[in-house]
Amino acid sequence: MFILKNAWISIKRNKGRNILIGIIILIIACACTITLAIKNTAVDLINSYKSAYDKEVTIGFNRENMMKDFDPSQEEGRESAREKFENIASYTISDVEKFADSDYIESYYYTYGVGLNGNSIKKAEIESNSNMPNGFGHGKENNMSETDFTLTGYSSEDAMSEFISGAYTMSEITDNAWDIAFNGNYVFINEELASYNNLKLNDKIKLEDEDGNVYEFEIIGIFKENEDDNQGAMSMFSNSVNTIITNSDAVVNLTNGNENLKASIYPTFIIDSYDNVEKLQDEFYEKGLDENFILQTNEELAESGVASVKNILSFSTTFLVITLIIGGIVLFVINMINIRERKYEIGVLRTIGISKLKLTMQFVAELVIVSVVALTLGTGIGAVSSKGVSNSLLANEINSSNEKTEEVNKNFGGMNRGGEKGTMHGKGMPVVQAYDSIDAVVDIKVLLELLSIGISLVLVSSIASMVSIQRFSPLTILKERS
Amino acid sequence: MANMKKNNYGSKDSLGKNVSSKEIKIKNKVNKDISKKKEKKEVKEKNTSPKDIILSIKNASYRYSDAEEDDYALKNVSFDFECGKLYAIRGRSGSGKTTLLSLISGLEKCTEGEIIFDGKSLKDMNLDKYRNSDIGIVFQSYNLLPFMTAVENIILSMDVNGLKIKNKKEKAIELMEKVGLKASYANRKVLRLSGGEQQRVAIARSLSYNPKMIIADEPTGNLDKQTETEILEIFKKLAHEENKCVIIVTHSQNVCDTVDKIYDLKKVKEK
């Protein structure tokens, strides 16, 4: 008890020095509060952004594996490579379902495509031979390039990546389109195809397979392909002009019982962690995936979106470290001077029998009392100002977050498709949080971090007093004084 | 009452005052008591046994850590100190007086030999506890904390000792009065006190936890003759009336004339 009493007497006696120490700790606490609040907010933002881009895995060609024996200078080599490419065993919906039955996979969706010819409508002529969307056409089962139209079935909204990315934008849509789009023979068609065949919403179109079976669909939406995303289109029509979008069940129904109607599937698996991709790939191979396929992730894409926040995170971490180092050194020096000035006091106290431990405790207690007051004030000031500072630092990120949300909503026809206000709905698509401001909160985590910083600062700056008290000989001190 | 205590410590003489018969009776009783005590003391002195020895220095030698192997500050010193006696350790400058005091007070440790206090070797004792319970130290330069008042300095020493009494301040003021300081000085910062007054505060501080032994290093070195006499009277009283062992390190003849026994320290190495 007398240690605290003496500590308090010393604090009152050395007001100037303790106010100086207090101001330094207050500045450090204030800077640390703001920095930690920004750091934690930035981490939250990164996590939120990454979760917006669900951890996706798709199946792609293992080009390295396919090309390892390929010699382009030899005719035989080219033939062998072509043959190898054609012999790659493709996968079916049941394979995808089998692959998806894994502990590493949280959910999955897929796009299912089939080639059909026009019956009641005509194909819009384009110079390009291919009318397939990106990602299709692998495997020997593909025969869509020989047909008029590609009927692409999506398993869910999540699978409609062209709309999410902005490659397609809905220009006209029926009021109940999203209620019925995945239950029956309903389609979205390209506005150029609609214009070419004079089609409008709620019109019915007929398509037929090579065996002459006719299938009827109702138009519930008309989309356009954005020019920016129409790379390499040389004709008056876009690449997607003959692509007709429906749901995967509709395509499955068409292919069931019709062996000649071959379809291609493009699955996307949502996984729990990027760390498990290799294990998942091995599992896929065990389940029969051809070794010429590999698993690809969207990790790079997710990372690229948070580059600016990462810069702020890195800046705040560096600033925090520098503040702590400089603050620690300044406090250490002040305490060293303090100890030197109070040598006589130490000598007297040691002479009258106060132990080194108790004396050290008294000096530490003085610093703790000053630190607690300064840390409390600094944290308070930091908490008040952290929101404003972090919002100004993260202003660009807030804007891009808002723009992204608006853009994705616009691509789907500006409809609120059941998601919460301000967020996009469904898995697989970027669930980008629309931030009006970054709520850099000084929460319990920040307070605990500050507490540990405070303890560390007190300990670091007390080292001077601890060491000096151990080293000082009371007799020498008193002799010097005499 | 305060005046009586002052008289007891010899600061003033109260002769010439008119006294009542009751007061005379009391005075006579006190005188009888004192003479009885003196008789007892004399008997005790004649029959000094090892039991009465509170401190025993046995072949103590001390060499500074940076000194040459045979360059001792103190060599083979053997002294015994008893309770109820006033001792002087005398010697020329450099004879090792202060070194011996540091060894006795546990501020330094013997290089060779040992010091036994109350039957225990200092080597086996907690020296902090020893300093704040068993002995009181008084320095030539008082070594009071200047930012504290007189009474705070005394209370601090009680706190360090862990003394658990309710009114420490009252006890401290009592001690101040015992060494001839007015109670009104209690809340005065020590720097505002004279040298003699500061030394009295230092003595009161050393008595605050009632130690068995008082060690004083040139306690009157900075004081005038009159004050020196008064301070010596306090030490004498502590030794003879409170049965404490008082050791004064000095080169003052006045001190040597007052004490019961003198130990001489000679220079270890004359050049």
Image (cartoon, helix red, strand yellow):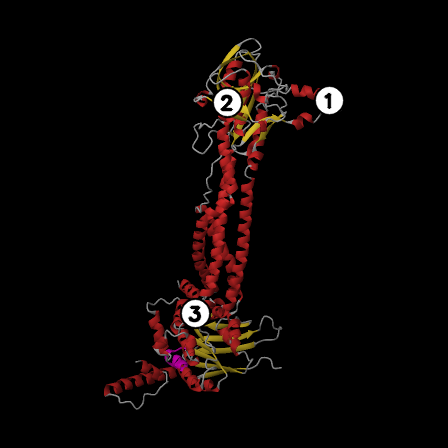
Q: What's the amino acid at mark 3? A: Asn
Classify mark 3: residues with Cα within 10 Å, few (<14), some (14-19) or many (20+): many
Q: Nearer the viewer, mark 3 or mark 2?
A: 2
Task: Find numbered disc 3 in the image and state the secondary structure of the residue it sits on.
Answer: helix
What main secondary structure does the magenta stretch of the protein show? helix
* Range of residues picked out in magenta: B234-244
Find the distance from the CA under tag 3 to the CA under tag 2: 86 Å
Which residue lies under the disc numbered 1?
A77
Classify mark 1: residues with Cα within 10 Å, few (<14), some (14-19) or many (20+): some
Classify mark 2: residues with Cα within 10 Å, few (<14), some (14-19) or many (20+): many
Q: Quadrant of residue B37?
A: bottom left
- Would residue A383 appear left or right of A230 to someone viewing this image? left
Q: Nearer the viewer, mark 1 or mark 3?
A: 1
Task: Find numbered disc 1 in the image and state the secondary structure of the residue it sits on.
Answer: helix
Circle on res. B132: 3
Query: Residue lying farthest top?
Result: A212
Q: Nearer the viewer, residue B250 or A28?
A: A28
